[in-house]
Image (spheres, helix red, strand yellow):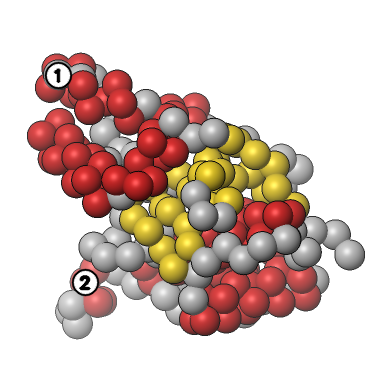
Amino acid sequence: MSKIPFSDLETAAYCPRKLYYRRREDEIEVPDEVAERRELAFRYADLLAADRDDLADLPLAVGPDEFRSNLEYARRRFDAAWSELRDPSDRERLTEGKDCRGIVHKVLSLDAPTPAMVFTGDPPEEGVWRPQSVRLVAAAKALSWEAEESVERAFAEYPTHGVIREVSIGTRRKAAYRTAVEAARTLDGPPPRLTNDAKCGACDYRAECGVKTRSLKSLLGF
């Protein structure tokens, strides 16, 4: 049985119908702006030392002062792991587990091989977004399978904000991962449309999908 890509599992957790349309494309390329933002996660030492003008020229989602404050907080909070987050011993590693495979952006040499995944969008106020949580679990399980040891945590990095969050690979996240695996593995036709306007309005496939999103006027009851 073929291994499911991490990206498919993240998409399945977001919307199985989106995964259906995505799989019909021949190849999905990483846009240059995404690669540029992701690269920030490998420059933390330089970014902490950079002045405001230099930071202002970078593709940050927040101002230079907020960015530096966030990154300083991460450095203090994850002191034991900071050297590996800043300068990982293993990066962009293709990893294969029992059910899935994909690139782990950073493999940290801590008490166990620990994944750190880089997300170029905005973080939620707390924790991580559910689809990203599924991708983190996939990375942890793949590393666990290769190393033949338990991996119980992961790190989510949002480099355009200078935000880093530690994630525990607990029961609820594992259950969401299993649901995504099942959805990705059994997908053989377009699943039912979602009714989540927030998700559908931002989807690249909404025209093909045919979902009707509500206008602001209708949401307000006019």
Amino acid type assigned to the residue bearing label 2 in the image: Lys
Give the foreground label among 1 and 2: 1
Point 60% across, 56% down: residue: 139
* Near-viewer residue (172 or 212): 172
Residue marked by disc 1: 51
x and y percentages locating residue 147 in the rendered image: 70, 55
x and y percentages locating residue 22 in the rendered image: 66, 54
Q: Could you tell me which secondary element the residue under label 2 belongs to?
A: helix
x and y percentages locating residue 58 in the rendered image: 28, 24
Q: Which mark is residue 102?
A: none
CA gap between label 1 and label 2 equals: 44 Å
The answer to whether residue 100 of the structure is visible from this angle is no
Point 43% across, 54% down: residue: 155
Amino acid type assigned to the residue bearing label 1 in the image: Asp
Q: Residues within 10 Å of mark 2 (few under 14, many from 20)?
A: few
For the image shown, how many numbered marks are present on the structure? 2
Whether the residues at callouts 1 and 2 have beta carbons within 8 Å, the answer is no
> Which quarter of the image is occupied by the N terminus?
bottom right
Compared with 34, 22 (above or below) is below
Q: Which mark is residue 217?
A: 2
